[in-house]
Image (cartoon, rainbow, N blue to C red):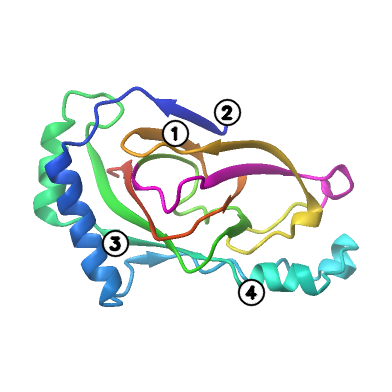
Amino acid sequence: MNYKKLNLPRIPLELKFKIISQAMKKYNKHTGYTHQFGDYGPTQDNLEEEYGVVLDQDDLDYHETTGSVGFYTANEKHEITLQQYYRKVPELANRRWAIQVVSGGEHVAPHIDPPVRGGPGLLYILKTGGTDVKTSWYKLKDIHQGSGVDHSVGIPLKMLDEVETHVLEEDCWHYLNFHGIHGVTNQTGVRLALWAYPNV
């Protein structure tokens, strides 16, 4: 399973707006992200030799214009409030919190998240970044199945078949598989989400 909309309590509106305000202040001041996984513009190494894939100008333009994914650490006061608010919700109890920022382009090229931050994730969409932003999952075409791909770099669309697409609704929780190849399209503004990750 790559995606599921979750029936979990919504974040109180006042807290949501405070979290958005904190994130946008940092973003507008170009405050460095706690973690940034790159813009996914670079592609797999040795595409032609290893995969038999030759990128044309449209492919190169697609990767050069892809957006980036970064994270800010949640304000300590907000984190404590979230921990208390969700302490009786098993899926969200004993979690840490970060703010995901997706920006810089109308799309994020298909990629696999790095192992340190990858895997299944719980995201609460604070701002969708547009009216019809799509999150899609892909699989390698049969011809490429034996080669595998690296994490943290863009994977050319011509190597992939789309397997599912979802529009992530604002103000609710979503389960996403970040181990799978995934990307974003139709984004017109900054996308903000609250990420609940294991407290290990």
Could you tell me which secondary element the residue under label 4 belongs to? helix
Residue stretch rendered in magenta on the structure: 125-147
Labelled disc at residue 99: none
Could you tell me which secondary element the residue under label 2 belongs to? loop
Q: Which residue is mark 1?
A: 175
Q: Give me the residue at 76% from left, 67% from top.
A: 59
Residue 101 location in percent, x, y? 38, 59
Q: Which residue is mark 3?
A: 72
Q: Amino acid at mark 3?
A: Tyr
Q: Amino acid at mark 2?
A: Met
Decide if residue 10 is on the left or right side of residue 168: left
Q: Amino acid at mark 4?
A: Glu
Asked whether disc 2 touches disc 1, contact meaning CB atoms under 8 Å apart, the reply is yes
Q: Which residue is mark 2?
A: 1
Camera-side residue of 73 and 133: 133
Could you tell me which secondary element the residue under label 3 belongs to? strand
Whether the magenta-drawn stretch holds residue 127 is answered as: yes
Whether residue 122 is visible: yes
Quick one: label 1, few (<14), some, or many (20+) residues within 10 Å? some
Distance of mark 4 from mark 2, alpha carbons? 30 Å
Q: Earlier in the sequence, mark 3 or mark 2?
A: 2
Q: Which residue is mark 4?
A: 64
